[in-house]
């Protein structure tokens, strides 16, 4: 029922009372025995029971995933340095050895040409 003092209420209170009455009539029209109200109450309670832990745990999980990502990036960078440094050292040694080999080959070729007979005999 509508409040009997509806004409004496302020504008906002009258609007709220009319909305409450209309929602109550709609609810009664949909479910006269009150099953809909109980169903909505149950779903609301379940959503609160699920939402509170999710909202408390979700930031912690996000922080843990962010830290895990940072640790993976740090480990990847460290291990790539461990692999790339020895490879660059080995490559440098091979290049120096190759240059020495090429230099010795050039010197040996010059020595052979100097030993030849200059008159072509």
Image (cartoon, rainbow, N blue to C red):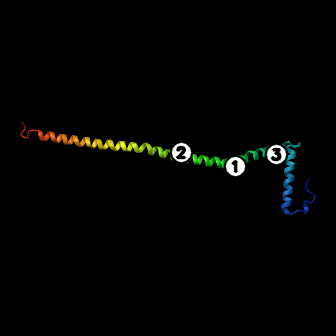
Residue located beneath label 3 in the image: 41
- The answer to whether the residues at label 3 and label 2 have Cβ atoms under 8 Å apart is no
- Give percent across and percent down for residue 109: 18, 40
User: Which circle's residue, 1 or 2, is located before the other in the chain?
Assistant: 1
User: Which circle's residue, 3 or 1, is located before the other in the chain?
Assistant: 3
Residue located beneath label 2 in the image: 72
Say few, some or many: other residues with alpha carbon within 10 Å of mark 2 (under 14 / 14 to 19 / 20 or more).
Answer: few
Residue located beneath label 1 in the image: 56
Seen as rendered, the residue at the extreme right is: 4
Disc nearest the viewer among 3 and 1? 1
Q: At 34% across and 44% down in the image, what residue appears?
A: 92
- Give percent across and percent down for residue 28: 87, 46
- Give percent across and percent down for residue 12: 83, 61
In the image, 38 versus 13, the foreground residue is 38
- Give percent across and percent down for residue 90: 36, 42
In the rendered view, does 5 fall on the left or right side of 69?
Answer: right
Say few, some or many: other residues with alpha carbon within 10 Å of mark 3 (under 14 / 14 to 19 / 20 or more).
Answer: few
Quarter of the C terminus within the rendering: top left
Under tag 1, what secondary structure? Answer: helix
Which of the numbered marks, if any, corresponds to residue 81?
none
In the image, 57 versus 21, the foreground residue is 57
User: Which circle's residue, 3 or 2, is located before the other in the chain?
Assistant: 3
Say few, some or many: other residues with alpha carbon within 10 Å of mark 1 (under 14 / 14 to 19 / 20 or more).
Answer: few
In the rendered view, does 58 fall on the left or right side of 20?
Answer: left
Under tag 2, what secondary structure? Answer: helix
Q: At 64% across and 46% down in the image, what residue appears?
A: 61
Estimate the spatial distance between the alpha carbons at disc 1 and disc 2, rounded to whole Å. Answer: 26 Å
Q: At 12% across and 39% down in the image, what residue appears?
A: 115
In the image, 77 versus 27, the foreground residue is 77
Estimate the spatial distance between the alpha carbons at disc 3 and disc 1, rounded to whole Å. Answer: 23 Å
């Amino acid at each position: 029922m509508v409040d009997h003092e509806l004409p004496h209420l302020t504008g906002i209170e009258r609007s709220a009372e009319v909305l409450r009455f209309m929602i109550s009539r709609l609810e009664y029209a949909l479910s006269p025995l009150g099953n809909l109200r109980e169903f909505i109450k149950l779903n609301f309670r379940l959503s609160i029971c699920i939402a509170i832990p999710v909202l408390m745990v979700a930031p912690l999980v996000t922080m843990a995933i962010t830290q895990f990502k940072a640790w993976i990036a740090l480990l990847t960078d460290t291990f790539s340095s461990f692999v790339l440094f020895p490879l660059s050292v080995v490559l440098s040694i091979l290049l120096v050895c190759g240059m020495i080999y090429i230099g010795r080959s050039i010197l040996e070729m010059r020595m052979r040409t100097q030993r030849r007979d200059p008159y072509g005999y």
